[in-house]
Image (tube, coloured by chain):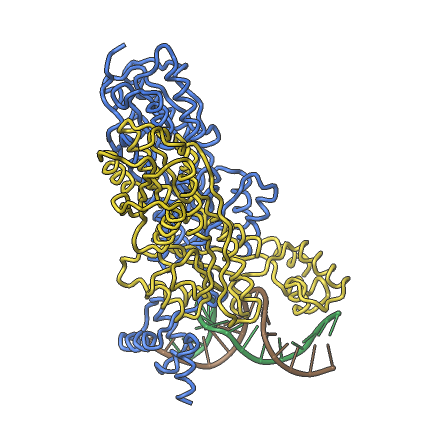
Chain colours: A yellow, B blue, C brown, D green
Amino acid sequence: MAGIAVSRSLALPATIVQVAERAGVSIKTVSRVLNKESNVRPDTRERVLRVAQELNYRPKLSARSLAGARSFLIGLLYYDPSAAYVAGVQRGATLRCRESGYHLVVESIASVAHDMSSQLDHMLAALRPDGIILTPPICDDAEVLAAIEAAGTPCVLISPGHRGRALPHVCMDDVHAAEEVTHLLIGLGHRRIAFLKGAPEQAASAWRLRGFRRAMKAHGLEVDESLLLQGDFFFQSGERAATELLRRRRPPSAVFASNDDMALGVLATAQRLGVQVPHELSIVGFDDSPAASLAWPALTTVRQPLFDMAAAAVDMLVDRTSEADGRAAVGRVLPYEVVVRASTAAPQRKK
Amino acid sequence: MAGIAVSRSLALPATIVQVAERAGVSIKTVSRVLNKESNVRPDTRERVLRVAQELNYRPKLSARSLAGARSFLIGLLYYDPSAAYVAGVQRGATLRCRESGYHLVVESIASVAHDMSSQLDHMLAALRPDGIILTPPICDDAEVLAAIEAAGTPCVLISPGHRGRALPHVCMDDVHAAEEVTHLLIGLGHRRIAFLKGAPEQAASAWRLRGFRRAMKAHGLEVDESLLLQGDFFFQSGERAATELLRRRRPPSAVFASNDDMALGVLATAQRLGVQVPHELSIVGFDDSPAASLAWPALTTVRQPLFDMAAAAVDMLVDRTSEADGRAAVGRVLPYEVVVRASTAAPQRKK
DNA sequence: CTGAAAGCGCTTACAG
DNA sequence: CTGAAAGCGCTTACAG
């Protein structure tokens, strides 16, 4: 018997029954100890813990999930995993999940797909994640949000637009950040500042433009609408905008791009055209993506606390499952940081 | 009764029992139909399918997992999710998982962590994934591989080094690719070609260097060892190497960097120093990362079939669970593609 | 071609 | 402070 039990424990993972038998308690007590419930005598707790350790016991997730109210799974929904933004969020989410005994399941949603909401429905119904994290731009997709609400899955949105703020979310203050970085340029002496807008469907685009306008207004500067160009958050739209701007008779002395990818496009184009950065053209971005610090000159930008935002999102989801439900939607605002590097300087000549 | 049943089905997801009752069959038959088993009368199958559709029935993963031999979960282990390489793999893996009814759980492994193998052990024991995909460099980490073997979890390695090829894996022919790209440079007229090595601990570094040497030898060219520089696959090592090379009395006319990030570092440095690319310096990379085509001039490089490699890895894991186990380890080699862009040209002047 | 029974490994009420 | 019983929602062997 003992021989068989031992060989079994080596071959197959131990179960709660084996731990209970060996510790001389019921499986319920083992469960209590492992879930850190109260009302267990200290020495009983010790013993169970020791036996669990000896048998290298790990509760099986599918069993806990089937019996209990939690799946210990959190979903991360994104549009494109290549984006530095998503990578930052994923990094924070996986780490905090591990710390909380959760696991992160990733799913990409092609918003073009016609059966997108049925795909999502399928995933939610099969997996039953305890919560789901949505990144821009899908955190503002009405169809996606409807599918999630229909499934009754708790969610946390990362940097949602207006409508999304009725749901639990975590974000930073894009308006103030854009304002602050614009102040920086103005303080340097810039007056003709071009602003490169982000994708129209993304909420952040509007916030950042608003911050830019506010700062200009605060300094009594009029915004030259011909210096407001439409971009889409991609590198190439930065190139296009810069090409257009730098060919003008009176080019701007600074460009504020709504994200780093576009700022990098502006930077590359400036260099290609022989425009000195920062002396002839200052450039600021937004995000502090890994490439921002690798560029030369390194980009002045706004550091989004993606890692912390993701960790906070996981916390909200994990706490929600253990606490009472139905509480009012909460939002957490995390601090950003303006990172001044070498792509900004005083304008060479005043115009 | 009926009223209650309906309101239940609206509030809570339907279970197999409800489908069985409504279709007038046993739950076993429902199970057979949904798992596409044979031996079900066509009309019975139709009816079950229709009822399942009506009730919007989705089998709960945790129940299937607990009762059966599969978890429908596949793990993706990586070191850093920001790397374009990992993003490419993740993209292919999530898509194929969805097509196969599986889900992808991501986990980052900091190889510096002292308790790394216990972290991994924990994850494998709790989640019981049906398989796990390992990306470089951790696919060659002995400790990681030992933990996975101990857990008995099937795995597929993406582009492993020598030792890893005893395990199931999917890769491309790095040696030939490097050879081909070197031929390209030689064919263009380059003789003094610098080679920028990758991180020593990564297998790909050695394969690519070998291909370079082979091509040189095939053309009867001697490799100038002073033109072989050590890099680490990061952008900055490309900058460092280029700075060193371009300051020499006799700089090379071309640089073959072992990956795109380093090639981009070389490119940026060349431009900073006023060296014309490709006329004064040709540059080739390896990977075809997203940034390679955005650079200016766009990078000549080798396209790794990351998406397909990941999809193939998922297939191997999924098929393995449904087929007989214990088969010999297999390896799949996928075709690469040399992508010629604007960073390569004939050398300006022969030396 | 179909079904009744047992069981996967836990948690949830409940009782003491 | 502790445990016996029931049950989560499926699949697995087995029987017919």
Rendered location of residue A109, percent (x, y): 34, 57
Quarter holding residue A261: top left
Rendered location of residue A260, percent (x, y): 37, 41
B137 shown above or below A276 = below
What residue is drawn where x is 24% and y is 12%?
Answer: B349
Rendered location of residue A245, percent (x, y): 25, 37
Q: Which is more toward the observer, A27 or B25?
A: A27
From the image, which quarter does the N terminus of chain B lie in? bottom left
What residue is drawn where x is 39% and y is 84%?
Answer: B6
Query: Is A223 left, or right, of B65 in this rendering?
Result: left
Q: Which is more toward the observer, B276 or B170?
A: B276
B248 shown above or below A288 = above
Q: Residue furthest bottom?
A: B1
Rendered location of residue A59, percent (x, y): 59, 60
Q: Which is more toward the observer, A196 or A130?
A: A196
**Residue B70 visible, this angle:** no
**Residue A15 visible, this angle:** yes
What residue is drawn where x is 67% and y is 57%?
Answer: A52
Query: Is A56 left, or right, of B245 in this rendering?
Result: right
Quarter holding residue B171: top left
